[in-house]
Image: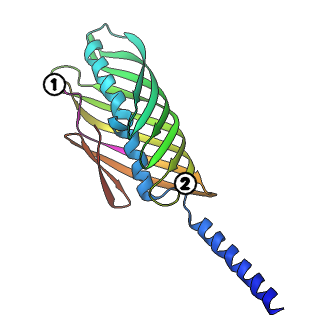
Amino acid sequence: MKKINATIMLAMASLMIVSCNKEEDPAMTEEQAADYIETSISSSDGGFNEELRKVVELAYAEYENNCSYTGDTTFTSEYNGVRSYNYTSTMDWFVTCDGLAVSSITFNLNKTGNYEGPRLTRQGTTTGSITISDLLNTTSYTANGSLTSNGSAEFTGVKNNVSTTMSSSMTLSNLSVNKTSYEIESGAASVQIDATGNSNSASFNASVTFNGGGSADITINGTTYSITIR
């Protein structure tokens, strides 16, 4: 009887440990949220900075066209290495004028694909729009817009592998983009991420400060993560 009771108690304790461990596994940690944002931005990860460079190139080529001019294009971004990605992006745009002078160009984006890197893999779709202004008589364009992403991700190398369903929104505020180098010189973004996985959910709000020189800082709950966006 004692042996049976001990076995039962051991089994119950094991179940409690497994249950507690399972409850402690989050859908996403703060550090993983920062990794996810980095791959959403960095050109070397196939992030939106790649599309922004394309947008600026098109703005430079198209701003002299007639008012209400429209266009569209499709392009792919692909790289295989320590970080690998494959994305297809479709963009259409239209020119807005103030009187007879071109004042801005708005680009609508639809992007789909996948990414695999040292700390996470992700796949999904991003949609949104970016408006480019200050087209004339300045050394830098100004970019404002918003992007929404939906898909899934699996995080590795931080804790246990965690598979999550992801949704995020990013608002771009007054990004200054050099007309020659196409690099972001300054500006900010706000990001909200919602994740569901391991029968749990997690949400994070982050701010991104673009410092110029290919660097940016992500701040979540007072903790700052410095990243490279080239």
Which of 181/128 is in front?
A: 181
Side of 12 where 69 appears, left or right: left
Which residue is identified by label 1? 138
Q: Residue furthest top?
A: 66
Instruction: Calculate the distance from the C-alpha at mark 2 to the C-alpha at mark 1.
Output: 46 Å
Q: Position of residue 230 (x, y in %)?
A: 28, 37
Q: From this view, report whether residue 195 is shown above or below residue 148.
A: below
Which of 24/135 is in front?
A: 24
Principal secondary structure, stretch drawn in magenta: strand
Which residue is identified by label 2? 162
The amino acid sitting under disc 2 is: Val
Side of 150 where 181 appears, left or right: left
Quadrant location of the N terminus in the rendered image: bottom right
Q: Residue furthest bottom?
A: 2
Q: Position of residue 118 (x, y in %)?
A: 41, 47
The question of residue 46 being in magenta is answered with no
Coloring scheme used: rainbow
Question: Is label 1 in a helix, a strand or a loop?
Answer: loop
Question: Is label 2 in a helix, a strand or a loop?
Answer: strand
Q: Which residues are magenta?
A: 181-191
Of badges 2 and 1, nearer the viewer stands 2
- For the point 40% across and 49% down, the residue is 35
Give the class, few, some or many, for how many residues have Cα within 10 Å of label 1's Cα (few <14, many ≥20): few
The question of residue 185 being in magenta is answered with yes
Side of 163 where 77 appears, left or right: left
The amino acid sitting under disc 1 is: Thr
Which of 158/209 is in front?
A: 158
Q: Position of residue 80 (x, y in %)?
A: 40, 33
Residue 228 is at least partly visible in this image = yes
Give the class, few, some or many, for how many residues have Cα within 10 Å of label 2's Cα (few <14, many ≥20): many
Mark 2 or mark 1, which has the lower sequence index?
Answer: 1
